[in-house]
Structures are given as structure tokens and as C-alpha cells.
Image (spheres, helix red, strand yellow):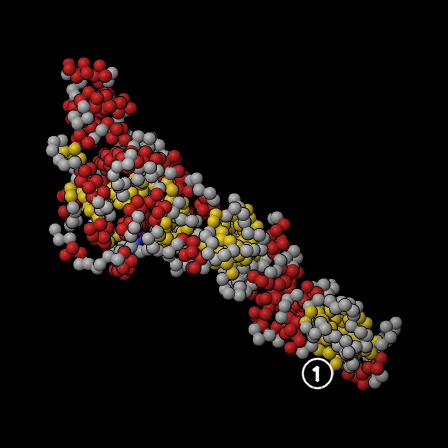
Amino acid sequence: MSAPHHVNGAYDLSTVMPPDGTALGTVIGGSLTKGLEVRLAAGRLVEEIAAGRYVTIEATGQKFFGMITDVELRAASEAVLRQPPEPDDGFLRAIFAGTAVYAVLHVMPMLRVTGAAASTPEPVKTVPSHFSAVRDATQAEVSQIFGEDGPGHFVIGTPLDMDVKVCLSYDRFIERSNGIFGKSGTGKTFLTRSILTHLIDKSSAQRDRGKRSVNLVFDMHNEYGWEGSSEGGTGKVKALKQLLGNAVAVMTLDEASSRRRGVRYDTAITIRYQDIEPGDIAVLQQTLNLTDNAVEAAHELAKHFGQPHWLRGAMELVESDEETADLLQRRGIHAATILNLRRGLQRLVRNKHFLVEHGGADSVQSILKYLLHGTNVVLEFGAYGNDLPAYMLVANVLTRRLHEVYRERIEAVHGGTGEPPPHLIITIEEAHKFLNPQVARQTIFGEIAREMRKYHVTLLVIDQRPSAIDDEVLSQIATRITCLLDNERDIDAALGGIAGARELRAVLAKLETKQQALILGHAVPMPVVVRTETYGTEAFYATFRQRLGVPPPPVDDLYAP
Amino acid sequence: MTASLGRVIEASIDRLTAVCHTLDGAPPLGALVVAEDDAPAIYAAVTGALTGGIDPGRRLAPRGGPGDGRAAVLAQNPQIPALLQTTFTATVTGHAGPGGEMRRYLPDAPAPVYALVRAATAVETAALCAEPDYLKLLLTAGPLADEVTAACLRRAAAHQPDSRAFLITSGRALAGLLAAEPDRLHAILRRIRP
Ligand SMILES: Nc1ncnc2c1ncn2[C@@H]1O[C@H](COP(=O)(O)OP(=O)(O)OP(=O)(O)O)[C@@H](O)[C@H]1O
Ligand SMILES: [Mg+2]
């Protein structure tokens, strides 16, 4: 055992009885990259210390803020471990605790505030000196760091063991793409719904039009629009439309399902054959079991038939037909390839009532109308949520077209004409399906993630398996809200590219299975573990309405069909 | 002021030996005593007591028959008590500063020879034990230091309002001081366990 342990085995009276009850310990070593070692004060029980908790370190002329990332038991000498007291020997245990044996907290220093009280926290570039006093961070400090609820910040939850609100920066959150990760059932959807509610509310509070944002949610499992279900005994919870009324439009791909569930939807959405491009098929290559050649062939056929007609044309090709054989030969397409493509396309269009060949409205235009007007759109998939090709096709087609329009508009603005559209945030579940390394380069989602906010479109990706997302895309996910993950690779992915992330691993792996999340990145000044608000109780709705300034129901009167 | 127990007959900076006014009148092991008498008080803990002949060069001759008890021997030889004396030794654990404040470290000079020695009062004992620094001096009190330390703590605890808390605080201090000597630590802790 190294020398410092013996030095610190010495008796230190000053740490026995913290005068104000909040002293946690004393810095006894560490480094900027590995974090600090803090000897737990003898009066404190190691059992009450939780990884993820905030501490303040009082150094000369400045304060450091950090997070407990690990807790370790040490002995001043091996000898005491050779004759440990009996578990029921309270006398000896009271004597040895904090003297012969003691706990060391590993603390990651993250921010520091110098001198004046009003100075803003800045990232750490050094560490506090030996024997600096460490104590629990106070509520005032935490709220100073994370900002107060207001137009620029929205509440995300409460830090562990504290009764204070942690806020995310609205500006920073809408500025870049963000991710919500966690195993199944950890509360991603509940958290996303609450974040969306706040985003919608904060957007309306922005005076500067350039800071307004609007959401498009691809609601795979019908949880965001009208109501969500809770797996506990509580049953149903209100979703965005019920909470926010006219600020939200619910659209559906599956009217029958929406009606069955009693959802008051605004519009049904159709996708026209002519809206589907070969690129949309490329994204579905794996899902539809298409060969590379088949994807290539789709592009060729689009050139031959023209965009509006290629899908029908490709599905009707009969390779034995002489004219077809001729076409295939000219385009250099194998008969086997056509077989593969045709099978894939037929599978794609089978049983999809939202796909229309003739007629049908241009859904992109109707969605766009809402979005440009500042109305948030939730697109319910109804029963199609269980049909992965359908989900991917629709999300990709719509997003691609919306992105085109946004791009044109922004370019026009740069050219001096028109108003910039509100910042668009697209929420997608099962994000890795669109962003895995095989397809990330081809999908519009990969492009949006990579180009950042250039065209005022960003993503809110929700995923159980961040490791399946392409590295480059992941590195663009600026704020990461991560619920419990237990797969090592997923943990690595969620923390990837973040300074000090190695130390946060333990914190992440120790989250509770529900309603706890580690937040790090662009929208928070330092990583934070929060307990998210319990969504869905009457008290919750009431405080929510109050905070959002939404008048109380009756909902039924407001949205009579 | 408590009556004096004896008089210093030999003193070094860290130790003193006193002869008792009465035969067998030594204070108990670990008891705190004060050598005062015109000089600033020096506090010490009793480390041992000895009763023997006045002349250290001569052994007591055997008296009495095999059937005689101690009382019978003394009755037959009334001169014996005059030939005997009791001395005790104590190890210095602190002293009073010029303003009377408690200093739990060694004084500048030994206790003056022939100074009177008395038992420490409860107030003085509590003052000395208010901080555990004196334990370091106790632990160097010679081969029997561990016994002396344990005895001293047991006696001091009896004067404390919460003796268990006092013993725990003291035990914690010992755990720090004896971090490298766990066997000694355990030996003392076994002797003071309430
Ligand atoms: N903030 C919360 N308030 C109330 N209940 C919650 C909250 N978070 C999670 N829960 C409970 O946990 C259950 C699972 O949460 P949720 O559906 O959000 O998980 P998920 O991470 O989206 O899972 P999946 O990956 O399977 O979609 C909810 O049905 C609800 O009962
Ligand atoms: Mg979910």
C-alpha cells in the first residue's frame, strides 16, 4: 500500500464532527484527468453516499464543483483487516470507522467559480490543493450552476438527494441534435414526452422568433400524441395534445387504430408512390433483404420510368418479357436482381393502407403547413408501429422532403428573401435503425445529424442501443440523456467522446432501473444525475399546467370532434 | 484543595518519583496526579508504586513464623513501619502554561524536588482529557505503557458524563497513533471496552 495511506491513517480531529453537518471529507490526492480522492469525514456514513451526488470543494479563493463517481473502502494498514472486529462489536467498529479503516470518495471536478459570487462557473483546468475541504453542494449552488426555470431553461428533474430543480438550457438543446438512451422500460418515452412538453412551452416564450422551435414526432408506438400507457397499475397518462391543446396536431397513418383508441387526431396522412425515391429504398436494404445490386437497380429504373412511376414499374417488371429483358440488358441489371428487388418492394407495399398510388394529398405539404405555423406535429403510426419497414419508409420519406423544403427556405433567407422557418426538432424512436453504420451515410437522418443546425433541423434520437449508432453520428449528439444501460458497449457509446467519461461509467451503471438519468453534454454545464419527475399524476398535471400557464381543462370541450 | 499524597524525590522532564506521606498511600495505577507547590502545575499519570525498605541497599529481613499473619508480624515488630516507605512513579502528560492553560505536552523543566504531589481534581482530569494529545505521552510511558494508558482511560472515563463516547473518541485517537502497531492497539482497546 502506498505511503499516503499511512499518512492519512493518522487521526484528524477536524474531520470528526463537521461543525455544520455537511462536511464530507478532505482532498487527499488525485489528478485532473483521473479525478480527486477525498477521504470521507469520520462522522459520515459511507452507506449514505451515492455515486452521482454533487459536492463542493472549498479551495483557496475559489470553489470547485464535482460529482462523486465512485466510493472505495480502504484500511490505514493491512493489520486491522487481519483481526477485524465482530460485526456486532459496536465499540470497536465505532473506533475503527474513519481511523484504521476509512472510505475514499472519487470525485470528478467539473466546474469552478472564482472569487466573486456572481462569476459564472467555468470548466476546470486544475485541481484543488491537498486537504481542501469537501462538502455537500448546497441547493443554491446547484441552481446557480444549472440556471433557473425561465425562457432560457427548462426543468428536467431533481439531482440525487436534493430538493432542487436541475434545468437544461433551451437554446443549447435546440441548437444541436440530442439523444435519449437507456434499456427498455427505463423511462425514455416518459422523459421524452416531458422534454417535448417543455420545449413546446419554452418556444412560445421566446420573443426572438429566431429562437422558436417546433417538433415533429415519429410516434412509433402511439405514446406522444393523445395518451400514453403506463406499465404500472396507473394505466393511461395524458400526452402532448391533451396537455397542450392547439399547440399540437396529431396526425395518423392508421385511422382505424386511432379511432379505436379514441384519439382525437387532426389529419390522416398518406404517402404517395410518387413520393418514394430509390434512396428511401436504400435505407431499407437490410430490412427488406435487398442486395446491393437491387438498390442500384432501383436507381436505374427510376431513371427509366421517371420518379413518379418507377415504383409501380419496378414491381410489374416480368423478366421473361422480351421488352423487359431488353431494358434490363441496356441497364445492366440481372434477372436475379430484379427478382430480389420486386420481392422487396412487394413486401414493402403489402398491407399498407397509407400508401396510395393515385390521388391522395401531399402529406408533406400539410405537415409543413402546421410546422411553419409553429404547430407541433405528432405522427401516430397506429398498428404500423410494429412494421419496421413502414416506420422507416415513412420517417425517411417525410424527413427527406421536409429537409429539402427547409434547406430551400434557409438558402433563400441567406439570399435575402423570406423568413427563416422555426427550428425543427425531429424525434425518432429506434434511432439506430436509421443511423447504424450501414445506412447512416444514406439516410437523411445521418445527414441531419452531421450537418448540425445548418438548415435549422436537428434530431432528438431515442434508442435502447446507442452502440448500434454510427460513431460519427453519435459524436454529433450534443446532449445525451442516458437512463440505465447494462451493456458495456452501449455504455461506451453513450459516454463516447466526453472528457472524464470513464469515471462516469460507474455512475451510469448504478442508476436505478427507472426514472433516473445521467445527463451530459452541450445543454448542461456539467454532467448531472437526475431523478426525473413522475409523469402522469393529477398533481403533476396541475403543476405542469401551472408552470406552462395552460388553462385547466375541460379537455373535452376544447377538442370536441 | 485535595490533601497532598506525597513529595517529589526525583524528577526528570518526563517522569517523576514521589514518596508517600503514609505507608501504602500511593494513588492507583493510571490515576492523574499534580505536582504543584509554588511552581506551575505538572500533570502526570501514575505508572507504578513500590513499597520497600527505607535503605535501598538493605533488604528487609524475614520476620514471624509460618503461622503468623501479616497483622501478627506487624504487632510483634512495631518498628517495621518506620523502616518502610512507599514511593510511586508517574509519567508526565501535560502541564499548566503561564496563564494556567492546559498544555498536553512536556514542560520546560522537571517538577521541583520536594514539591508536594496531590491527586488531580475531576475538573483538572476533564480538562486534560478534553483533547487526546496527552495519549501520545502515555504511550511512551515505558514497558507497561499499554497498561498505564488503559488504566488512565478507564479512570478518566468514570469522570465523564458520557463515558462510552469518551472511550470511543479516545479509542479513535489511539487507532491513529497506533496505526502501525495493531497488536498494541487491540490490547489497549480490550482493556478499556466498556
Ligand atoms: N417519469 C416517469 N414518471 C412516471 N412513470 C415513469 C416515468 N418513467 C418511467 N415510468 C414508468 O416506467 C415505465 C416504462 O417507461 P417508458 O415507457 O418511458 O420506458 P422506455 O425506456 O421508453 O421503454 P422502451 O424502450 O421499451 O420503449 C412507464 O410505463 C412508467 O410506468
Ligand atoms: Mg419507449
- At numbered mark 1, what does the secondary structure look like: helix, strand or loop? loop
- x, y percent for residue A50: 45, 55
Direction right: furthest residue: B57
Residue drawn at x 73%, y 65% is B141
Callout 1, which amino acid? Met
Q: Residues within 10 Å of mark 1 (few under 14, many from 20)?
A: few
Residue A268 in sight: yes
Residue B144 in sight: no
- x, y percent for residue A192: 30, 48
- x, y percent for residue A150: 34, 55
What is the tally of numbered marks visible in this picture?
Answer: 1
Q: Chain of mark 1?
A: B
Is residue A445 shown above or below A4?
A: above
- Image quadrant holding the N terminus of chain B, namely bottom right
Q: Nearer the viewer, residue B31 or A200?
A: A200
Among the 4 quarters of the image, the one containing residue B169: bottom right
Q: Which residue is mark 1?
A: B1
Q: Nearer the viewer, residue B62 or A315?
A: A315
- x, y percent for residue A182: 35, 45
Among the 4 quarters of the image, the one containing residue A291: top left
**Horizontal side of residue A92 vs A527, given as left or right:** right
Residue drawn at x 67%, y 78% is B121
- Image quadrant holding the C terminus of chain B, namely bottom right
**Horizontal side of residue A25 vs A294, given as left or right:** right
Residue drawn at x 25%, y 39% is A418
Is residue B67 shown above or below A464?
A: below
Residue drawn at x 35%, y 35% is A450
Is residue A378 shown above or below B83?
A: above
